[in-house]
Image (cartoon, rainbow, N blue to C red):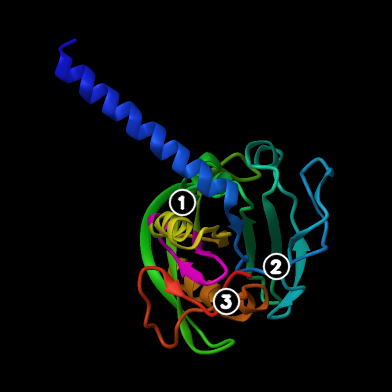
């Protein structure tokens, strides 16, 4: 190797070492920010009935006449995600037959608790046929626009007679920390890095999702019902809001700040 290449190699190694040391120093002195969702002493279990945690994200007991039914965390999630991950998961069946599920994954000190939502849906057999960035108009605790992503999904299933049929799904998700809301994964990661460098603490983000299935052709009506359900339920467990009446940047600043 020529001398100039050795010099470049040594410089690169030195820069990597300095960066690693700098990040290590930040991690050693950082503290964890406040979450943007309510957490309480509500036990949550896995699909085998084993206790996952005695704390969970506290979802509402009733929404629009539909009672909450706690749902277990899959053993794959428990195995794959960091031990300090906090969950919240309930299904709701409204009196008119409309059903949906709310799921919340809240990170702790390990940022790998939250992955791209698309990966999980595809792993469960759903095909993503459309992606739209939307704003859900919220009225509580004040009027603001909640930035989110809507995934339109499709799956082929067998009925009781073994005949194949198609079912569609509407999946709406977003991310919140103690003082931010965004529907963009890249913006969330950038916010984490910026806050660590400038303020010295790790933002504690939660990934919130709502999911409802429907027959082909009912997608738009299902999306509208899901948005109404979000309006009625999200303020009961999400403690951060955006700025009034849709004046959002990609990451919307809320009102809370870490202790």
| Residue contact between numbered discs 2 and 1, judged by CB atoms under 8 Å | no
Residue 236, position as x, y percentages in the image:
67, 77
Mark sitting earlier along the chain (3/2): 2
Residue 256's disc number: 3
Q: What stretch is highlighted in magenta?
A: 170-186
Residue 139, position as x, y percentages in the image:
54, 88
Residue 102, position as x, y percentages in the image:
63, 63
Residue under circle 2? 92
Label 3, label 1: how far apart the Cα atoms are = 38 Å
Label 2, label 1: how far apart the Cα atoms are = 21 Å
Residue 42's disc number: none
Mark 3 residue crowding within 10 angstroms, few (<14) / some (14–19) / many (20+):
some
Residue under circle 1? 154
Using the image, determine if residue 64 lies above or below residue 49: below
Q: Quadrant of residue 184?
A: bottom left
- Which quadrant holds the N terminus? top left
């Amino acid at each position: 190797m020529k001398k100039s290449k050795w010099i470049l190699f040594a410089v690169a190694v030195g820069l990597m070492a300095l960066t690693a040391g700098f990040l290590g120093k930040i991690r050693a002195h950082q503290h964890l920010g406040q979450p943007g969702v309510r957490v309480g002493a509500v036990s949550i279990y896995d699909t085998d009935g084993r206790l996952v945690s005695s704390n969970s994200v506290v979802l509402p007991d009733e929404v629009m006449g539909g009672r909450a039914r706690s749902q277990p965390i899959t053993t794959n999630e428990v195995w794959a995600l960091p031990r300090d991950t906090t969950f919240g998961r309930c299904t709701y069946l409204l009196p008119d037959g409309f059903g949906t599920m709310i799921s919340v994954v809240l990170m702790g000190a390990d940022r790998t608790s939250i992955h791209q939502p698309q990966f999980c849906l595809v792993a469960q057999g759903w095909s993503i046929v459309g992606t739209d960035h939307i704003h859900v108009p919220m009225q509580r605790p004040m009027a603001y626009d909640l930035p989110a992503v809507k995934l339109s999904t499709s799956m082929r299933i067998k009925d009781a007679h073994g005949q194949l049929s198609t079912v569609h799904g509407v999946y709406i998700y977003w991310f919140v920390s103690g003082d931010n809301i965004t529907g963009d994964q890249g913006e969330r990661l950038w916010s984490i890095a910026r806050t660590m460098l400038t303020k010295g603490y790790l933002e504690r983000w939660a990934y919130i999702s709502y999911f409802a299935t429907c027959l082909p052709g009912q997608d738009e009506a299902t999306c509208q019902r899901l948005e109404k359900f979000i309006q009625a339920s999200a303020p009961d467990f999400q403690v951060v809001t955006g700025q009034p009446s849709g004046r959002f940047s990609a990451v919307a600043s809320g009102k809370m700040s870490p202790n």
